[in-house]
Amino acid sequence: MDKRERVTAAFRGQEVDHVPVCMWQHVPPEYWGDDDKFAAVQAKFLQDTDVDFMKLSGDKYFGWPAPVLAKIEKAEDLYRVRPLGADHPFIRGQIERTKKVIRALGGECPALCLVFVPLSCIRLQIGYPMMMKLIREDPEAMKHACAVVAGDLKLLTEGLIREAGADGIFYSVQNGEVDRFTYEEYRDWVTPSDKEVLDFANTLSDMNAIHFCAWEEVPNRLKVWEDYSSPVVSWSRYFDIMDIGDAKARFGRTVWGGFDNRPGTLLYTADRESIEKETESLIAQGGKTGYILGSDCSIHNELPVERIRWVVEAARRI
């Protein structure tokens, strides 16, 4: 199998010759202002690690640049959020940069583009405290804003896949921590806009992955995402479900993960032999059907990328 055949089979839950590996890092800020350099950094990461597919970074394009969010203080202002539109630099910039990244990768492997859920796009602009203040003050106002953002994210998703050439999206669902919303609140206030974007992405590609993000280091209320449709779930082994077999059974599809991404953990501190043994252990648990080897979330830039390559090379011997 080549990389594309291997990754496609894994996404479909079919047996592979060896378990594909994908980990990712953020691109350092000094490259955000130059799309060519940004693309070169992503291509070098592929060259240095030889991962089976790429999760492309969304760095620079995080917080939603709606003017009303710049100095928002009350929830009723959310009703003034309006669509950016397909030609807005926030959307066009991501599509044009992704074109350059895809070209730089040279067709060597599949690539998924990071897309945040609508509520996270707003939160990345205004911060968690303000997000929670506004949504509890007037949930309908936040639902309106999220619906507007969802419409723009659909334009972005279509451009990333159909125009820029990405194979699918890496859809980062967040805000599901057990101490943030009740099940009923999340499903009413957040789920509709989450699913609007994801369901649309699934009409464009069968290579989309959902990332059950746990970067706040608080377990997620996984039940809120159980009916979110995708062929692959990237989950947090160290905060949500430790056993790979349990994750496969819980989600009923291919799962992606295994290593702790936090500094100071095994991937950062252990010698090569220990990392290779952990790779063997994870693959023994996950098997060659319905499993992709990765990490809970982004690998910090302090990690020498040769350590990711150790994982890749060990996986290919199994």
Image: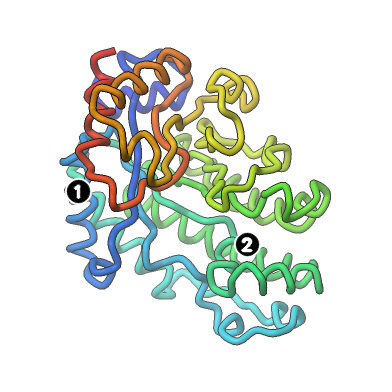
Residue placed under numbered mark 2 in the picture:
119
Q: Secondary structure at mark 2?
A: helix
How are the residues colored?
Answer: rainbow
The foreground one among 10 and 175 is 175
Report x, y in % for residue 97. 29, 62
Quadrant of the image for the C terminus?
top left
What amino acid type is highlighted by mark number 2?
A: Leu
- Mark linked to residue 43: 1
User: What residue is drawn where x is 67% and y is 64%?
Assistant: 147
When asked about the image quadrant of residue 77, the answer is: bottom right
Q: Is residue 210 left or right of residue 111?
A: right
User: What residue is drawn where x is 67% and y is 49%?
Assistant: 177
Q: Is residue 126 left or right of residue 7?
A: right
When asked about the image quadrant of residue 131, the answer is: bottom right
The foreground one among 27 and 226 is 27
* Position of 264 relative to 251 (above/below): below
User: What residue is drawn where x is 79% and y is 67%?
Assistant: 139
